[in-house]
Image: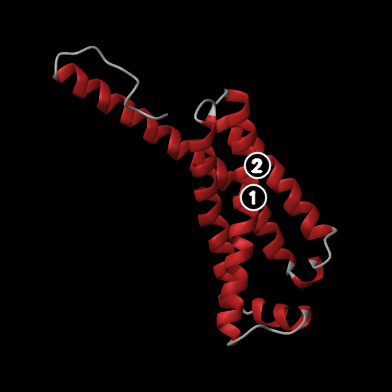
Amino acid sequence: MSSFVRTILAVIAGVLLAYGLPWTLERILVESYAGGRPMGAAAYFDVRNTPLIMFGRVLMAFMLSVLSGHIAARIAKYDAERTVAIAAAAISMVLIWDYTGGEFAWGTPIWMRIAIVLLTGPSMVLGAIARARAAEVQAQEAAAQAAAQGRPPSSQGTRP
């Protein structure tokens, strides 16, 4: 698979994961907290805007964005940090639009909108950096193991 195709797939996957995972888990969290599916947007936001759920949503935004960045970096393989930075910029623009002009922007407190927008992009890049460092460590370990066995280092057994 070409580097360009991997880059496009990584950006798309990063945006979909960083946007879809927190939203899906938020719905599950709200429905389990409410004891069922809240009927209507107002009832949903009444449950979602409790302090515990809002804290969980911001924490999920951070953790799942790191995971999304890590996965997107694995897909990209080459130049992963830059590729994930593109995905992070795209998801930040989507979130800004969603929280300013989206249909349900009224139901989210302003501080939470700002926190999620400010956390999501940098968290994705953090996940990409962690993946890049892990790939470097794996490559170094493979080279050291190859040297210990007396054979030339090869990049076939490692994944960036």
- Per the image, the residue denoted by label 1 is 16
Q: Check contact, mark 2 vs mark 1: CB within 8 A.
A: yes
> Percent x, y for residue 48?
65, 76
> Percent x, y for residue 42?
77, 81
User: Circle 2 — which element?
Assistant: helix
Measured in 3D between alpha carbons, the distance from the residue under mark 2 to the one under mark 1, in whole angstroms, is: 6 Å
Which residue is at a point 14% across and 19% down the rendered structure image?
149
Crowding at mark 2 (Cα within 10 Å: few <14, some 14-19, many 20+): some
Q: Quadrant of the N terminus?
A: top right
Which residue is at a point 56% across and 83% down the rendered structure image?
33
User: Circle 1 — which element?
Assistant: helix
Residue 117 lies left or right of residue 25; in this view the side is: right
Residue farthest along the front direction in this orientation = 1
Q: Is residue 51 above or below residue 98?
A: below
User: At label 1, which amino acid type do we have?
Assistant: Leu
Crowding at mark 1 (Cα within 10 Å: few <14, some 14-19, many 20+): some
Which residue is at a point 69% across and 84% down the rendered structure image?
38
Which corner quadrant of the image does residue 60 belong to? Answer: bottom right
Q: Is residue 1 above or below residue 46?
A: above
Which residue is at a point 57% across and 69% down the rendered structure image?
55
- Per the image, the residue denoted by label 2 is 12
Q: Is residue 43 above or below residue 61?
A: below
